[in-house]
Image (cartoon, rainbow, N blue to C red):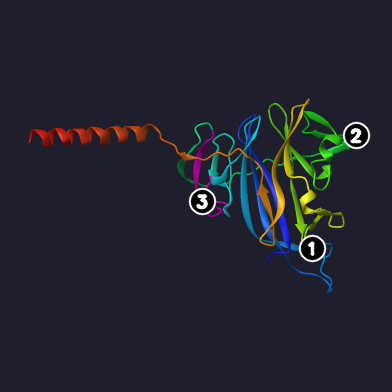
């Protein structure tokens, strides 16, 4: 049993207007604790194991990808090919790993064989608070969002949010955070990973769901991903996205040729038997 959780969110742009969102969730256990008193401010909370939950932003809405979730395997994407590491152990740099092509439109996957390249997510841009707005800038584009529009959705604070720039706007998300069971059920202690002295103690049933946002310069859309809840005495995510995508195997030209050949072969054998 763990003492809390550690989590992070990564965004992998699929093209100019869509992206994959991967949530890494780990049960955390206290490591070294100076002195006898164990609390979140002076103990290191270390991950025991990670479970990944994967979502897809299609430009307008969020979809949950169960086949790419509930796994302890590292998932990697390449925006130009939409390839991901599926059902394999995480590769080491310079070593081959089995990758698959993901066709989000046809909702199917196609094995690509061994690839030596390991793909990485886009690093989000941190926001800056100016005159009642949260400002995100990548040097060429800038978006200013009224602070009050984000406050009701954040678990810690808007300074913990990051933004990835897409063609028509930005995806905004909390990059990382953690929580402790120190206070006791039904409360949870939520400290900032970069500043452990800044903590928030809240009832877990009153926390807003962890959300990702899309802002096009005019309208802010909030997409709740999951709630933090207790499950079997552990702090765990409870997925609230109601749209899911199940993938089948892609059937390419070669598959149709093989299928047609087998049908012709069966017909030919039947005709030969009839003549005999």
Q: Is residue 89 magenta?
A: yes
Q: Tell me the CA gap for discs 2 and 3.
A: 45 Å
Quick one: label 1 or label 3, which is nearer the N terminus? 3
Task: Please provide the residue range marked out in magenta.
Answer: 85-104
| Residue position marked by numbered label 2 in the rendering | 132
Q: Looking at the image, is 44 positioned above or below residue 123?
A: below
The image quadrant where one finds the N terminus is bottom right
Coordinates of residue 120 in the picture (x, y in percent): 63, 44
Q: Residue 52, which numbered label?
A: none
Quick one: label 2 or label 3, which is nearer the N terminus? 3
> Relative to residue 264, is residue 244 drawn left or right?
right
Q: Looking at the image, is 127 positioned above or below residue 144?
A: below
**Residue 195's image quarter?**
bottom right
Coordinates of residue 218 in the picture (x, y in percent): 78, 25
**How many C-alpha atoms fall within 10 Å of the one at disc 3: few (<14), some, or many (≥20)?**
some
At a point 69% along the width and 62% down the height, the residue shown is 233
> Relative to residue 254, is residue 10 drawn left or right?
right
| Residue position marked by numbered label 1 in the rendering | 184
Identify the element where label 3 is drawn. Answer: loop
Coordinates of residue 219 in the picture (x, y in percent): 77, 27
Q: Is residue 275 magenta?
A: no
Q: Residue 87, which numbered label?
A: 3
The image quadrant where one finds the C terminus is top left
Q: Looking at the image, is 222 positioned above or below residue 75?
A: above
Residue farthest toward the right in the current orientation of the protein: 131
Identify the element where label 2 is drawn. Answer: loop
At a point 63% along the width and 56% down the height, the residue shown is 50
**How many C-alpha atoms fall within 10 Å of the one at disc 1: few (<14), some, or many (≥20)?**
few
Prevalent SS, magenta region: loop
Q: Nearer the viewer, residue 122 or 265?
A: 265
């Amino acid at each position: 049993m763990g003492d809390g959780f550690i989590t992070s969110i990564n965004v992998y742009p699929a093209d100019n207007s869509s992206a994959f969102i991967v949530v890494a969730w780990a049960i955390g256990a206290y490591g070294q604790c100076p002195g006898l008193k164990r609390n979140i401010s002076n103990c290191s909370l270390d991950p025991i194991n990670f479970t990944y939950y994967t979502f897809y932003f299609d430009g307008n809405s969020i979809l949950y990808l169960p086949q790419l979730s509930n796994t302890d395997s590292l998932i990697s994407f390449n925006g130009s090919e939409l390839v991901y590491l599926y059902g394999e152990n995480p590769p080491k740099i310079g070593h081959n790993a089995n990758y698959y092509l993901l066709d989000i439109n046809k909702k199917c996957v196609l094995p690509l064989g061994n690839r030596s390249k390991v793909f990485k997510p886009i690093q989000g841009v941190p926001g800056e608070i100016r005159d009642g707005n949260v400002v995100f800038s990548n040097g060429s584009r800038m978006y200013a969002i009224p602070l009050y529009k984000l406050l009701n959705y954040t678990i810690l604070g808007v300074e913990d949010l990051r933004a990835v720039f897409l063609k028509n706007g930005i995806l905004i998300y909390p990059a990382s955070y953690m929580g402790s069971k120190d206070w006791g059920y039904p409360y949870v202690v939520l400290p900032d990973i970069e500043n452990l002295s800044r903590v928030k103690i809240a009832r877990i049933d009153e926390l807003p769901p962890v959300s990702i946002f899309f802002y096009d310069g005019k309208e802010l859309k909030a997409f709740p991903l999951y709630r933090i809840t207790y499950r079997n005495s552990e702090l765990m995510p409870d997925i609230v996205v109601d749209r899911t995508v199940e993938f089948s195997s892609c059937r390419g030209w070669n598959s149709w040729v093989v299928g047609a050949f087998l049908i012709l072969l069966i017909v030919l054998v039947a005709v030969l038997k009839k003549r005999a």
